[in-house]
Amino acid sequence: MGVACVQVFGSEGDFAPAAGGASLAVRASSSNSAASGTALSVSAPSGTATGDLVIVICHINGQTTIVDNNGGTSFTEDLNDFQPNTTSGMTCSIFSRRILAGDPSTYNFTGGVSARWAVVAVAFSNPDPSVIYDVSTGTANTDNPPSDTVATIPSVTTVTDKSIHLAVGLADGAGTPLTSDPAGYTALQSTSNQGIRAAWKQITPAGSTGVQTMSCTANDGVIGLSIAIKSP
């Protein structure tokens, strides 16, 4: 068991600009989990619309792989099979997609082994038309002690005013859910089976998010993810 923290940023793509200079906002979120299986899925967050940005966090028990299984409406894997804790054995990936007309209402992914899994999806309205993440990808802020009862969300420094910081904690044990959100953050989802807890805060003015934490109900392997979504 152990703890790892990673900041996840930096994927680009062209898209229509936000209408009328509207601000980036969290539209909605959704989650799903299961005690076993290789087929990971999650419903599109309520009200997801053409032009929205959807971020999907997948978490599965074991050192394995997680791949997109959405055919012609595929998601881009921005964090690929992150598995820093070989003792505990847990894998997470982060995917993104700019939603197009006719996209399906369920998003599908495939794990490399049959195991506990969880998925959280977050939809954002009025994202930046060209750049998804506000800071370049980096894993320098990682930590991996033997075990912990806290998922530490590393501090990152946003550069664009009103970007949104996602604080995400993952817990490896089926019976060790994460139970608290950082002060000033709004809760999104908290899953069972293979725990994911996500919360958000708009950072204005741009600057440091500070180190944040999420508590676990027991000592277990955890991962902390710090994700900044760029405001237009």
Image (tube, rainbow, N blue to C red):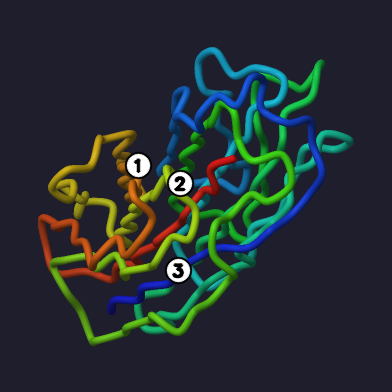
Residue 98 location (% of width, % of height): 72, 35
For this rendering, which residue is in front, 31 or 135?
A: 135
* Residue that mark 2 sits on: 163
Disc 1 vs disc 2: Cβ atoms closer than 8 Å?
A: yes
For the point 64% across and 58% down, which residue is it?
Answer: 66
Is tag 1's residue or tag 3's residue first in the polypeptide sequence? 3
Tell me the amino acid under the disc marked 3: Gln
Residue 145 location (% of width, % of height): 24, 86
Look at discs 3 and 2 and give the one toward the viewer: 2
Q: Is residue 123 above or below residue 109?
A: above
Residue 111 location (% of width, % of height): 62, 55
For the point 60% across and 68% down, which residue is it?
Answer: 81
Q: Is residue 44 left or right of residue 33?
A: right
Look at the numbered disc 2 and give the secondary structure of its residue. Answer: strand
Tell me the amino acid under the disc marked 2: Ser
For this rendering, which residue is in front, 164 or 85?
A: 164
Quadrant that contains the C terminus: top right
Task: Count neighbours of disc 1 (C-alpha within 10 A) and say few if under 14, some if 14 to 19, many if 20 or more.
Answer: many
Alpha carbons under labels 1 and 2: distance apart: 6 Å
Look at the numbered disc 3 and give the secondary structure of its residue. Answer: strand
* Residue that mark 3 sits on: 7
Extreme-top residue of the structure: 47
Task: Count neighbours of disc 3 (C-alpha within 10 A) and say few if under 14, some if 14 to 19, many if 20 or more.
Answer: many
